[in-house]
Amino acid sequence: MKQFILGTAGHIDHGKTSLIKAISGYDTDRLKEEKLRGITIELGFAALDLPGGIHLGIVDVPGHEKFVKNMVAGASGIDLVTMIIAADEGIMPQTREHLEICTLLGIRHGLIVLTKIDMVDEEWRELVTEDIREFVTGTFLEDAPLVPVSSITGEGVPELIQAIADLCAGLAERKPSGLFRLPADRVFTMKGFGTVITGTLVSGRITTGETIMIYPSMITSKVRGLQVHDRIVEEAAAGMRTAINFQGIEKAVVNRGDVVARPDTLKTSFMLDVELQLLKSFGKKIKNRTRVRFHTGTSEVPCHILLLDRETLDPGETAMVQLRLDTPVTCVRNDRFVIRSYSPSRTLGGGRIIDPVPEKHKRFRQETISHLEAIRSDDPEAIIVAHTEIAGFNELSLADLVIMTDLAENRLDSTLQSLLSRQILIQTDREVKRYIHRKTFEDFAAEIVDRLKLYHAANPIKEGMPKGELASKFPPNLSIKLFNLMLSMMVKTGDIIQTDNTLRLPGHSVTLASDQSDVKEKIIRIFNKNGLQPPTFKDLTATLGVDPKTVRNVLMMLVAGGEMVKVNEDLFFHADTMARLKRQLVDYLKENGEISTPQFKEMTGTSRKYTIPLIEFFDTGNVTIRIGDIRRLRKQE
Ligand SMILES: Nc1nc2c(ncn2[C@@H]2O[C@H](COP(=O)(O)OP(=O)(O)O)[C@@H](O)[C@H]2O)c(=O)[nH]1
Ligand SMILES: [Mg+2]
């Protein structure tokens, strides 16, 4: 069954409440004070089954100028409006203001009802009708049906019901959405039931037993019962006037203006980026930081207007502005809002929300203005790309993107898939579905390479940079999880090499790790002291009590640096010792022409274990040449 919500609008005493009673039988003036004074203060609710099988929820709003804020709360979320104008008085101030509010709230459908026709003659009625037609020219009611009615005599009432049914038959149902939202317009306690919150279910659906969250207080609770137009139901959907009964919530913790949704699907913010239209009828320009009242859904919050790209906003103009709110609100892109001034208290303008969770902007920044232009567009890709670009290391979750784009689930999904397949976005978490822009990753990779280059230059004897030290160079909003993920991507592409918790560039050859410099000192001392009778590799390893791999690495590094000389895999000598021995040998040969192995053994004063490898070392090093049992100098120097 199709469901729509109709709202009333119009000046006080023009017969709105009487008309609702005439068409539905409901008396929406429930409060004692309302009955006493004969005026509507609070929102009133009624229901009507239309011919053709459409169910209509009705919101009756107050016309009094003092209660416009209640009118705005009632009018947001309605599908169509009945603009009520009394035949005897014609167009009055709140007729104008309510039409402006409905326009700003994005209402596109409605009827004009000329009430109290029993009080005027034919000629007057025609004059007023002409007036009204002129009044609505250029507005969404320009081609709306105008139905003359008397709630007292009942004249025109059946025709009005038929006209509403005809209009509803042509309306499209609300677009399907997975995002359940209900801005609270009334909160009360019922004996034996606990707290009840009522409101127009603006999108998605909810069933009994589900867990919900109340924003902005973030209190969670369970749906104990649901009612739609006084009927108990298991499930309520978009476009229904809904009452939700909660378990264990105190009435005091919920207020009109709060939003009911599923846990962690919405976000609260003290700031909003919006497209603000200043009404022509407001008549004067506004300056930066003008203090106003912000109305969206059923909430009203004082705020400042930050003009981002101009000094003043003229009547009739539209601009992107940032609203700075006194208390947080919970919005979704494309939500409509109305702005009212303080004194005099009147509607100044309104528009739609472009970013429900923006960064704090500074004025006159080209970067900000370009970003806002991008997210204002209707192109889903452009919106997502711009948001992820500015978010940097702050990964955007699917839930974030739902409220930032207002896209239907399948549309959002296919757009994300397309961006991922072209690698414009990178998915950083499969389960929660989190995304960053590729540019963030590329900038990160470039910075890692730069940091490692600097580190290698400053620490040539270190194998690489400790991961923790590298992480500390990045802003705290880069989560460890994302940091690790991006490092592993770089390891995969071969841009960096990771061993244990150390990172290095592929071009960096390992010199000495920090824990090895201690080993290095000890080795030099040992070999210096033992001269021509140094320990073998095996003995050295045992003496040092360090693993052979490290000892060999350090030795090889010392050999490469010229501090040690490698005679064979097992035998190393200090470079100074070798230099001395070589000079001695060369001097001896210059003087004696040749040397035998025993003579060499005597010169060195060591055992055969050292003598043979040493003399052979001088052979291979082209210092000596072996002829039979003796050696000569290879080159006469
Ligand atoms: N004669 C006449 N009086 C009406 C008609 N509709 C409403 N009224 C009277 O106008 C006054 C205001 O009506 P109400 O419905 O409370 O107006 P609202 O402020 O727009 O809700 C009441 O005294 C009604 O009895 C009508 O069609 N004909
Ligand atoms: Mg009323």
Image (tube, rainbow, N blue to C red):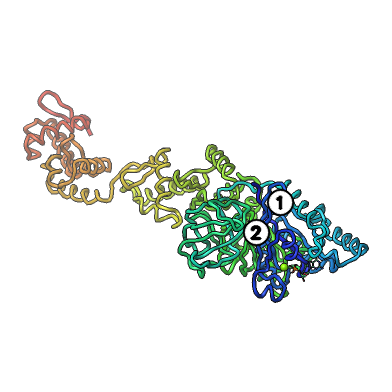
Vertical position of residue 543 compared to residue 625: above or below: below
Residue drawn at point x = 54 percent, y = 51 percent: 235
Q: Going from the N terminus, do you reach mark 1 or mark 2 first?
A: 1
Q: Name the residue beneath numbered marker 2.
A: 274
Q: Amino acid at mark 2?
A: Val
In percent of width and height, residue 152 lies at 80, 65
Residue drawn at point x = 66 percent, y = 75 percent: 33
Q: Do the residues under discs 1 and 2 have CB atoms within 8 angstroms?
A: no
In percent of width and height, residue 495 lies at 42, 40
Vertical position of residue 627 compared to residue 510: above or below: above
In percent of width and height, residue 256 lies at 58, 66
Inspect this view and state whether residue 319 appears. no
Residue drawn at point x = 48 percent, y = 52 percent: 393
Closest to the observer, 115 or 210? 115
Asked if residue 456 lies left or right of residue 105, the reply is left
Q: Name the residue beneath numbered marker 1.
A: 50
> Quarter of the picture for ligand 1?
bottom right
Point out the residue furthest to the right here. 123
Asked if residue 400 lies left or right of residue 634, the reply is right
Estimate how packed mark 1 is, as few (under 14), some (14 to 19) or many (20 or more) residues with alpha carbons within 10 Å. some
Q: Amino acid at mark 1?
A: Leu
Q: CA distance from mark 1 to mark 2?
A: 37 Å
Closest to the observer, 431 or 517? 431
Mark 2, ligand 2, within 8 Å: the answer is no
| Label 2 secondary element | strand
In percent of width and height, residue 556 lies at 24, 40
Closest to the observer, 453 or 410? 410
